[in-house]
Amino acid sequence: MNIASAFVTDASLIRRPPPERLRTLVGCFWALPCTADTRIRSLPDGCSTLSVEVFGCQRPRSFITGPRLGPREIAPQPNTTLLGVRLRPGVLFALTHIPAADLTDRREPLDAWRAVDAEELEGGLAAASSYERQFDVLEGFVGKRLDDTPVDDRILRAVALLERCEGRMKIDRVAERCEMSTRHLDRLFRQWIGLRPKSFARIMRFQASLARLDPTASPDLAHMATGLGYFDQAHLSNEFAELSGSSPRRVAPERVSDFSKTQCE
């Protein structure tokens, strides 16, 4: 999962793996010092993000970004450092108690939803004098809240099923395996993940197609489409166009992205 969550140009990423107890819940803690030419193109992966903008001597400002349904490209302000951590499916709600569906395809200031939390996080980061200390603050903030509110086990089971089958299991079968109705599964997904189960499954299949792209060779799209259960090559290409904003052949050379993978391989 999350072979390519984002492509970054003209910036060098600084990363720190999460501690063992958080590795199934979050990705690397990362810092990205931005230039005038830095661009970030994010792709749907079912995850959410906690991020912070640090600009000169100004107070840091924290943001929460819900799961995406399509690609998005941003050009950060020059001389800004972005800090953050990728949140695995379900973790956004555990971390903030904000229904994840309220943040789907949105990036919002944390203080608009959780003012006390934003004050704590931004104050701690303002006092941090290095990337390592900033990572300490982020890790402590996230770890404390996830210790207090674990992700619903039924969501973890459903996500694991859809990841393992690359989004190809029928949703009623997922619900049956998780011992609930499809309607209840839909409610839980919207609350914890911010996507309906079918949309999440679609994104898992898209991510599986990204994983099959060879950045050094022209992809066999017909074979890939058949292997992933798409109707045909045109169906695969249309999914790429909608979810990545590009074609498989154009994405292939840049497929492997070190930015915001869920795990720090």
Image (cartoon, rainbow, N blue to C red):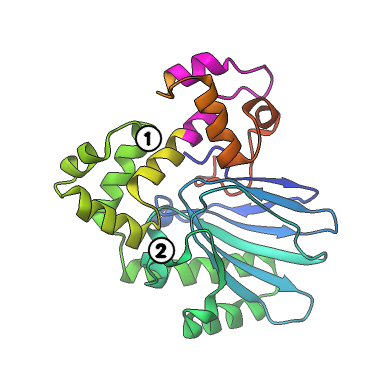
Query: Is 165 drawn above or below residue 47 in the view shown?
Result: above
Q: Which residue is mark 1?
A: 167
Q: In the visual, does 37 lie left or right of 129?
A: right
Query: Is 4 drawn above or below residue 216 in the view shown?
Result: below
Earlier residue among tags 2 and 1: 2
Whether the magenta-drawn stretch holds residue 19 is answered as no
Residue at the spot 20% in from the left edge and 55% down from the top edge: 184
- How packed mark 2 is, by other alpha carbons closer than 10 Å (few <14, some 14-19, many 20 or more), is many
Q: Position of residue 173 (x, y in %)?
A: 21, 37
Q: Quadrant of the C terminus?
A: top right
Q: In the visual, does 219 lie left or right of 55?
A: left
Which residue type carries mark 1?
Gly
Query: Is 189 drawn above or below residue 113 in the view shown?
Result: above
Magenta range is: 206-226
Q: Residue furthest right?
A: 36
The secondary element bearing badge 2 is classed as helix
Residue at the spot 40% in from the left edge and 63% down from the top edge: 100
Residue at the spot 62% in from the left edge and 28% down from the top edge: 248
Residue at the spot 69% in from the left edge and 20% down from the top edge: 216
Q: Are marks 2 and 1 in contact (CB under 8 Å)?
A: no
Image mark count: 2
Any mark on residue 100, and which?
A: 2
Which residue type carries mark 2?
Ala
| Nearer-the-camera pick, 124 or 63 | 63
| Nearer-the-camera pick, 128 or 151 | 151
Q: In the visual, does 202 lie left or right of 15?
A: left
Q: Position of residue 81 (x, y in %)?
A: 73, 65
Query: Is 98 drawn above or below residue 34 in the view shown?
Result: below
Residue 108 occupies quadrant: bottom right
Residue 74 occupies quadrant: bottom right
Any mark on residue 220, and which?
A: none
